[in-house]
Image (cartoon, rainbow, N blue to C red):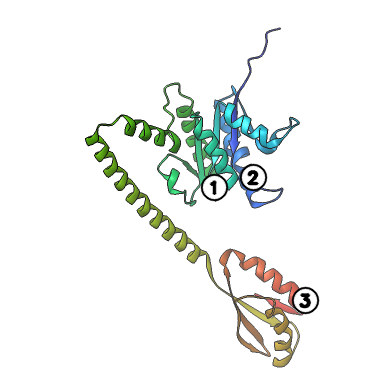
Amino acid sequence: MAKLAKKKQCFVVGPIGGEESDDRVHADWLLEEIILPVFETHFASFEVTRADKMSAPGRIDAQVITSLLEADLVIADLTTLNPNAFYEIGIRHTIQKPIVHMHLEGQTIPFDIASFRSLRFQRKWPRDLKKAREGLKQAVDAAIDPDHIIDNPVTFSRGKIEISQSAAPTEKIFLQELETVSSRLDRIEQTFADDARSTRRDDQYGQLIFRIRSKNTTSEQNFYDRLTPVMSKLKSAELKSVGSAGAVLAISAEKNDLHKIRQWLTLELGEDFLVT
């Protein structure tokens, strides 16, 4: 019987998180709906794995580092700027082997690696997944091409060191000036990135308004007495108005938390009150 050829290895790194966490949901979407379909269709000679999918006994951290060093390809998800993921990416960069960077649309990438290509993707609509798969196929084709030149922050820095060591005095002056310009550009990019993050936080944060009504006839004082202990549990809450007909409550919070806060108010106030 002919011996089956050993498959090449593709190792996926990025935020994983615990079961049912937002990170895990994101990681599984990326792995199961984007990466695996691409490799099953176009790169069948590869076996794709992720740290939490490893079944071999032994220390998981040692297995991860071994995979980073030995895998034929690494796909790195930069989304959420997970510290462990960046540590693993750094290991891969130092050995100058193929790696594909990816990140969810809207994620600001640190300026250290922002100038190096990273595949942006979304997963809001079905067409987003199709576009992400097409982009990943192109990126993998380029990364595993025998003529592909590895380009990352480590290889870039090594190249600068080699040039500076062999440069003539006049060339060193030019390199110093180039380094000054590069540093200024990095500071400008970082400033724009910080401003963008601040703007997104402002867009996501605001004053949420809730209208509370009693299902039964009640006095203004009884209404106020019922709301007081609930408000004591809230930060940045303000009672805009209260009367026998109802109350208006303003809470400063993230806009995405509107539904969660409404549910919490309903539970705290009880079934005699309606929160809208």
Measuring 43% from the left and 48% from the top, which residue is drawn there?
111
- In the rendered structure, the answer to whether residue 77 lies left or right of residue 212 reads left
The amino acid on which the numbered mark 3 sits, given as a three-letter code, is Glu
Q: Residues within 10 Å of mark 1 (few under 14, many from 20)?
A: many
Instruction: From the top left corner, tell me how far across and down residue 18 is, in percent.
Output: 70, 48
Identify the image quadrant of the C terminus.
Answer: bottom right
- Front-most of residues 154 and 43: 154
Residue farthest left in this picture: 170
Measuring 47% from the left and 36% from the top, which residue is drawn there?
135
Residue 148 in view of the camera = yes
- Front-most of residues 63 and 159: 159
The residue to which callout 1 is attached is 79
Disc ID at residue 198: none
Residue farthest front in this picture: 169
The residue to which callout 3 is attached is 271
Disc ID at residue 16: 2
- In the rendered structure, the answer to whether residue 180 lies left or right of residue 151 reads left
Q: Who comes first in sequence, dot 2 or dot 1? A: 2
Q: Residues within 10 Å of mark 2 (few under 14, many from 20)?
A: many
Tell me the CA gap for discs 2 and 1.
Answer: 11 Å
Helix, strand or loop status at disc 1: helix
The amino acid on which the numbered mark 1 sits, given as a three-letter code, is Thr
Tell me the CA gap for discs 3 and 1.
Answer: 41 Å
Instruction: From the top left corner, tell me how far across and down residue 161 is, in percent.
Output: 37, 34
Give the total number of marks visible in the rendering.
Answer: 3
